[in-house]
Amino acid sequence: MTQDVKEIFADRRGTGTSRGVSGRSVAVPSAQAAAPAPPAPAALAAKVRTLAPSMTRSMQRVAEAVAGDPAGCAALTVTGLAGLTGTSEATVVRTARLLGYPGYRDLRLALAGLAAQQESGRAPAITTDIAVDDPIADVVAKLAYDEQQTLADTAAGLDTVQLGAAVAALAGARRTDVYGIGASGLVAQDLTQKLLRIGLIAHAPSDPHLAVTNAVQLRAGDVAIAITHSGSTGDVIEPLRVAFERGATTIAVTGRPDGPVTQYADHVLTTSTARESELRPAAMSSRTSQLLVVDCLFVGIAQRTYESAAPALSASYEALAHRHRSGSR
């Protein structure tokens, strides 16, 4: 069997369905249908940063290799890359698919494109590690760069099909519950405040017990959103599971697209997974990417409900205007 034939067979898999929690049928798409379009070459590094923590160690070696040396890996066959990374051909193909490419040949094309971009003279990346003795000007520069990178990575990896479906569900929802703990809880509050200002009914219970009792009241036509960077926060997963079982449309905003929370999510919106450091914990970078997703959801909903959203926003501005005037009490 020639190498080209082996890659063709490795790139083709069948489709099927599985039965999800509470009897919902969950489609198991083929690799061809897993992503509407392969990521652009510039998005490859962002995808690797986002998905690497949820990969197996062997898949991480493949992902790190292609991100670290796109030109060299673009010249390798699937067998060559498997040998370079000490993995198998199947692992290479699975990694390509997880990164959003139908097969390894599509990944090679993206690698070639990324290598060409790098050859054109892109500015070198700066380190964002913050030392205890860094001048404050350096701290500002490093944080600003890291925030920009987090936003760019999230935008590059955000599935707009999933986003559009989430917006449609939220725009027509009778009621929306948003669950989050810690920094993610602040993001949940931000989203509910935005929805309330355009006349939609939304709740963000901060107490885990209240979140579950609220979720029990949900039904078809309602929406529940879980915001969890790790994808494994029990106090967020439990109310989402209850909402899922009650028939509500469920959405997960997470940095781990294969985390436990996604098994109860109809729609998954993936945020960037930035590298942690001692002085910059995950809660900081995850909040930045989550707020971008929340803003995308809000603007999409406001567009769909403009006839009612615009007057509601005007009314809320008017109600608060006197509090912002000079000399107001």
Image (cartoon, rainbow, N blue to C red):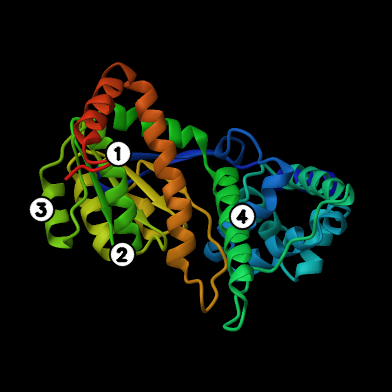
Q: State the image coordinates of residue 187 (x, y, percent, origin top left).
A: 34, 52
Local packing at callout 1 (Cα closer than 10 Å; few below 14, some 14-19, many 20+) is some
Q: Which residue is mark 4?
A: 149
Q: CA distance from mark 1 to mark 2?
A: 19 Å
Image position of 50 (left or right of 205): right
Local packing at callout 2 (Cα closer than 10 Å; few below 14, some 14-19, many 20+) is few
Going from N to C along the chain, the mark reached first, 3 or 4, is 4
Outermost front residue: 327
Going from N to C along the chain, the mark reached first, 2 or 3, is 2
Q: Amino acid at mark 2?
A: Gly
Q: Amino acid at mark 4?
A: Gln
Q: Amino acid at mark 3?
A: Thr
Q: Amino acid at mark 1?
A: Lys
Local packing at callout 4 (Cα closer than 10 Å; few below 14, some 14-19, many 20+) is some
Does 152 appear above or below 320?
below
Report the disc number at residue 194: 1
Q: CA distance from mark 3 to mark 4?
A: 38 Å
Q: CA distance from mark 3 to mark 1?
A: 23 Å
Local packing at callout 3 (Cα closer than 10 Å; few below 14, some 14-19, many 20+) is some
Going from N to C along the chain, the mark reached first, 3 or 1, is 1
State the residue in front, 198 or 177. 198
Going from N to C along the chain, the mark reached first, 1 or 2, is 2
Query: Looking at the rendering, which quadrant does residue 315 occupy?
Result: top left
Q: CA distance from mark 4 to mark 1?
A: 25 Å
State the residue in front, 254 or 62. 254
Q: State the image coordinates of residue 149 (x, y, percent, origin top left).
A: 61, 55
Q: Which residue is mark 2?
A: 182
3 or 1: mark nearer the eye? 1
Q: Which residue is mark 3?
A: 213
Going from N to C along the chain, the mark reached first, 4 or 2, is 4
Question: Tag count in the figure?
Answer: 4
